[in-house]
Image (spheres, rainbow, N blue to C red):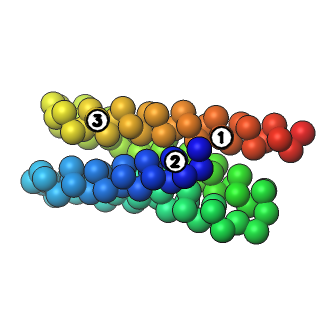
Amino acid sequence: MEKEIKRRSYLFSLETIKFLKSRQWDQLSMVLVRQLLRSATSIGANVAEARNSASRLEFKRFYEIALKSANETLYWLNLLKDGYQLKDEKLDMLLKEVDELTRILASSVLKLKQAKS
């Protein structure tokens, strides 16, 4: 599962970049776009960082940060969609994927917490 989440979070970052590059954004929307880019790429970065953790606790902490980034990304994507009335298949795909990533990460964090008990 660890390899799968790493692969999917990396691909999600790439697809987010492609989506953002494919559109013209006004000055106001650029504020949201930058926030989205930071949070979307943070998911995969923290999953990758977890791989070299010195302890199980540190590994769990990186996954918790990735989960928070996924939740934040979901927020920014929805804000862009609703705030700009965007109807875009790519955006819908990103929303679906980040929702799935959030569920996977939440399940992983829960399992890591339970394993400690």
Q: Is residue 79 visible?
A: no
- The answer to whether 63 appears left or right of 77 in the picture is right
- In the figure, 73 relative to 21: above or below? above
Front-most of residues 91 and 53: 53
Q: Give the percent coordinates (x, y) of residue 110.
A: 71, 37
Amino acid found under the numbered disc labelled 3: Met
Q: Is residue 60 visible?
A: yes
Amino acid found under the numbered disc labelled 1: Ser
Q: Secondary structure at mark 2?
A: helix
- Report the residue at 17% width, 57% height from top: 21
Q: Secondary structure at mark 3?
A: helix
- The answer to whether 19 appears left or right of 109 in the picture is left
Q: Is the Cβ of the residue at disc 1 closer than 8 Å to that at disc 2?
A: yes
Front-most of residues 52 and 92: 52
| Marker disc for residue 108 | 1
Amino acid found under the numbered disc labelled 2: Ile
- The answer to whether 40 appears left or right of 116 in the picture is left
Query: Which residue bears the numbered disc 2?
Result: 5
Query: Which residue bears the numbered disc 3?
Result: 93
How many C-alpha atoms fall within 10 Å of the one at disc 1: few (<14), some, or many (≥20)? some
- Report the residue at 21% width, 50% height from top: 19
